[in-house]
Image (cartoon, rainbow, N blue to C red):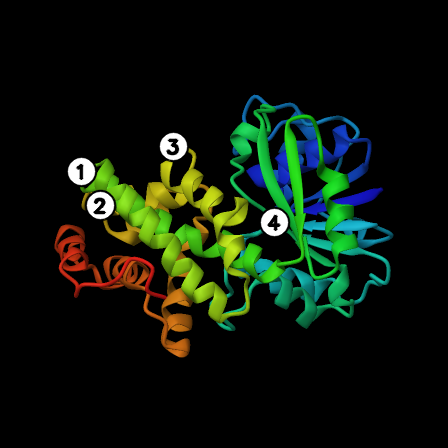
């Protein structure tokens, strides 16, 4: 197939390499001209994936027209908050037979919707041609062919299977599902809990505390996700618990890193200024706070993270406040 990947960050680059190695005709689009020049010159993403060679067959471009024209599939690998502005520039092109695959993991802060809704809003395509690819998959490991499993989701099972087939390799295993809502929300909401896990690390709490945050965090994700139309079992899978585990535990996790720095006493603006990559969980935390209030869903961990990030509440004090909440049944929904 002819496939474009929009966004040459670490994940976009890693997925472009997979697709090219699978025999597809791949175009990798990047917004920043100078960045594109470096990618073309070295055929290596020296900023985000140093040491990983980009196949010569991959066309690297700054032209959105080139990346949008006559493509069988377009993969969206740009931060959620920039997706709409890029798609608005693509409206003049025809996508009658194009499948769009989001690999972004966030919720748009103005509208409180996930990327599949942004695609539907901005482009004249059927919802059956929209898919999501998500799961526990750090680009740094995928690019080194470390065995990884993810899930492809679309409201149309055939579309999910097409995406599954396009990406499947001996080291990158893809499952399929029709619960696109659950897969999108699992990938987005776990980033907020991962910031909380990082705060636990930075504040020098222990493994017990982190296990509690992760386990109770997936309960919050499930409560909110089901209210928004997801299937509960999805959050026990790769895009739910699987992605939560890797994001809370890994040294590669940007969101865990943000939390860790906050837990060590740094302020959010200072932490974000020091980072090259985008931590989607920061903006998603605002969206989760608003969605939970709108739907009257209790999300105490996400609320605690929100108060620490945006109201500079003391992480240690907030942690003990969480521990001192009223008694609950574990499986109370």
Q: What residue lies at 74% left-to-right and 62% top-to-bottom?
A: 90
Q: Which residue is mark 2?
A: 263
Residue 228 position within the rendered picture, expressed as x and y whole percent measured from the top left: 51, 70
Q: What residue lies at 42% left-to-right and 51% top-to-bottom?
A: 191
| Mark before the other along the chain sequence, 4 or 1 | 4
| Mark before the other along the chain sequence, 1 or 2 | 1
How far apart in space, not on screen, are marks 2 and 4 (Cα)? 29 Å
How far apart in space, not on screen, are marks 1 and 2 (Cα)? 8 Å
Between residue 46 and residue 222, name the one nearer to us.
222
Between residue 327 and residue 119, name the one nearer to us.
327
Q: Which residue is mark 1?
A: 204
Q: Residues within 10 Å of mark 1 (few under 14, many from 20)?
A: some
| Mark before the other along the chain sequence, 2 or 4 | 4
Q: Pointers 3 and 4 in contact (CB under 8 A)?
A: no
How far apart in space, not on screen, are marks 3 and 1 (Cα)? 16 Å
Q: SS for tag 2?
A: helix
| Mark before the other along the chain sequence, 3 or 1 | 1
User: What label does residue 251 carry, if any?
Assistant: 3
Q: SS for tag 3?
A: loop
Q: Pointers 2 and 4 in contact (CB under 8 A)?
A: no
How far apart in space, not on screen, are marks 3 and 2 (Cα)? 15 Å
Q: Which residue is mark 4?
A: 103
How far apart in space, not on screen, are marks 4 and 1 (Cα)? 33 Å
Q: Is 97 on the left or on the right of 77, as rendered?
A: right
Q: What residue lies at 30% left-to-right and 61% top-to-bottom?
A: 306
């Amino acid at each position: 197939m002819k496939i474009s990947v929009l966004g040459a960050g670490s994940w976009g680059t890693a997925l472009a390499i997979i697709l090219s190695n699978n025999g597809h005709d791949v175009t990798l689009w990047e917004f920043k001209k100078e960045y594109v020049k470096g990618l073309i010159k070295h055929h290596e993403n020296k900023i985000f994936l140093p040491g990983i060679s980009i196949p010569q067959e991959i066309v690297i471009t700054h032209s959105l027209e080139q990346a949008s024209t006559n493509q069988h599939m377009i993969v969206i690998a740009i931060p959620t908050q920039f997706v709409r502005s890029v798609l608005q520039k693509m409206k003049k092109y025809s996508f009658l037979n194009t499948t769009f695959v989001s690999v972004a993991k966030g919720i748009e802060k103005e509208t409180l919707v996930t990327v599949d809704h942004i695609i539907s809003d901005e482009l004249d395509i059927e919802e059956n041609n929209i898919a999501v690819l998500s799961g526990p998959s750090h680009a740094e490991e995928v690019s080194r062919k470390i065995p990884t499993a993810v899930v492809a989701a679309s409201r149309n099972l055939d579309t999910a299977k097409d995406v599954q087939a396009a990406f499947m390799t001996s080291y990158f295993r893809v499952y399929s599902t029709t619960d696109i809502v659950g897969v999108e929300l699992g990938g987005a909401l776990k980033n907020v809990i991962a910031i909380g896990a990082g705060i636990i690390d930075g504040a020098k709490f222990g493994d017990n505390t982190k296990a509690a945050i992760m386990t109770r965090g997936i309960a919050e994700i499930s409560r909110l996700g089901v209210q928004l139309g997801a299937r509960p079992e999805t959050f026990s899978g790769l895009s739910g618990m699987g992605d939560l585990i890797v994001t809370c535990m890994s040294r590669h996790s940007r969101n865990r890193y943000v939390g860790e720095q906050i837990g060590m006493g740094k302020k959010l603006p200072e932490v974000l200024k020091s980072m090259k990559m985008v931590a989607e969980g920061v903006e998603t935390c605002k969206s989760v706070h608003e969605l939970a209030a709108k739907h009257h869903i209790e999300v105490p961990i996400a609320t605690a993270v929100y108060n620490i990030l945006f109201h500079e509440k003391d992480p240690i004090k907030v942690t003990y406040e969480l521990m001192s909440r009223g008694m609950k049944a574990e499986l109370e929904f």
